[in-house]
């Protein structure tokens, strides 16, 4: 019988934890109605997986004793980074959820000339909390042991600096100019240790933005003859990258 899985940022030396995160505790005690003696799994988002038994369930916390802890060494395939322009409504939350399920390692929200969403100040902080919770839920659902990081929103110049460098490949889907297919570009960069994908806003990147990225070493690519929405494009390139990873 499989054990229910919960998130807690435990350390390798821990032998017992107090699960007091409101969302995780609510799921354990109110949704699943688990009791002392029930077996559970705890993940820390950094490759750690603990097998434990509930010792106590209180009003707002649960005490869990560990029986065994294992540590996953991490992926041998290239690190995958998604640099995605912020779309309107809740589409970015869907992008985070689905890309987490597919295997992304880092998500960088991008502000561009045509981005219509403003994430700054207090709103940015609340969104980061929301994004982190989406990552936790998606990672638990697909049984990931390493959780992706969702960065704070950055400009195009900042994003290029974050993903460029030796041993890295940067792909820049664009609707104009000289481009190659993603498959061709991906095959030419098989040895990269990190692969980053830029996804533009509705209306695409401006010619000036494209020139900036391509001038910094990004490879302009096409995703086919159809014009894709932001969320569709993000999931398409991530699925392509995962399906074309070298075998473990």
Image (tube, rainbow, N blue to C red):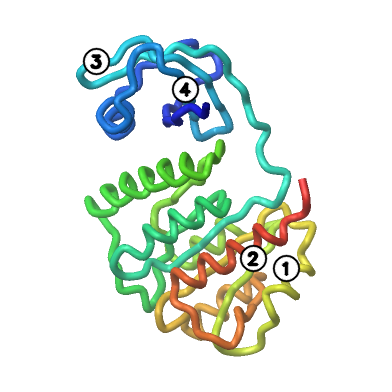
Q: Position of residue 190 (x, y in %)?
A: 78, 61
How far is mark 2 from mark 1, CA to CA?
9 Å
Q: Choose between 216 and 130: the one closer to the eye.
A: 130
Q: Is residue 55 above or below residue 4?
A: above
How far is mark 4 from mark 2, CA to CA?
33 Å
Crowding at mark 1 (Cα within 10 Å: few <14, some 14-19, many 20+): many
Q: Image point 49% across, 29% down: which residue?
A: 44
Crowding at mark 3 (Cα within 10 Å: few <14, some 14-19, many 20+): few
How far is mark 2 from mark 3, CA to CA?
45 Å
How far is mark 4 from mark 1, CA to CA?
37 Å
Circle number at residue 58 = 3
Cβ atoms at labels 3 and 4 below 8 Å apart: no
Circle number at residue 148 = none
Q: Position of residue 222 (x, y in %)?
A: 62, 81
Which residue bears the numbered disc 4? 10
Between tags 3 and 4, which lies in front? 3
Judge from the rendering whether residue 126 lies leftward or rightward of residue 215; answer left or right.
Answer: left
């Amino acid at each position: 019988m499989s054990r229910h899985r919960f998130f807690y940022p435990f350390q390798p030396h821990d032998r017992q934890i107090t699960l007091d995160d409101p969302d995780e505790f609510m799921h354990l005690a109110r949704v699943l109605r688990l009791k002392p003696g029930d077996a559970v799994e705890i993940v820390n988002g950094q490759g750690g997986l603990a097998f434990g038994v509930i010792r106590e369930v209180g009003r707002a916390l649960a005490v869990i004793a560990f029986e065994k802890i294992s540590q996953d060494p991490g992926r041998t395939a290239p690190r995958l980074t998604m640099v995605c322009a912020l779309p309107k409504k809740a589409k970015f939350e869907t992008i985070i959820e689905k890309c987490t399920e597919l295997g992304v390692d880092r998500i960088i929200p991008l502000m561009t000339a045509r981005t219509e969403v403003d994430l700054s100040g207090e709103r940015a902080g609340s969104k980061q909390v929301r994004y982190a919770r989406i990552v936790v839920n998606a990672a638990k659902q697909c049984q990931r042991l390493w959780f992706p990081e969702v960065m704070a929103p950055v400009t195009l110049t900042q994003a290029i600096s974050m993903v460029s460098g030796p041993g890295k490949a940067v792909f820049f889907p664009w609707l104009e100019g000289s481009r190659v297919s993603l498959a061709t570009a991906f095959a030419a960069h098989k040895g990269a240790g990190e692969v980053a994908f830029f996804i533009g806003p509705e209306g695409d990147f401006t010619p000036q933005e494209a020139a900036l990225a391509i001038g910094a070493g990004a490879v302009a690519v096409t995703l086919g003859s159809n014009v894709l929405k932001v969320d569709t494009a993000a999931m398409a390139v991530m699925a392509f990258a995962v399906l074309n990873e070298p075998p473990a």
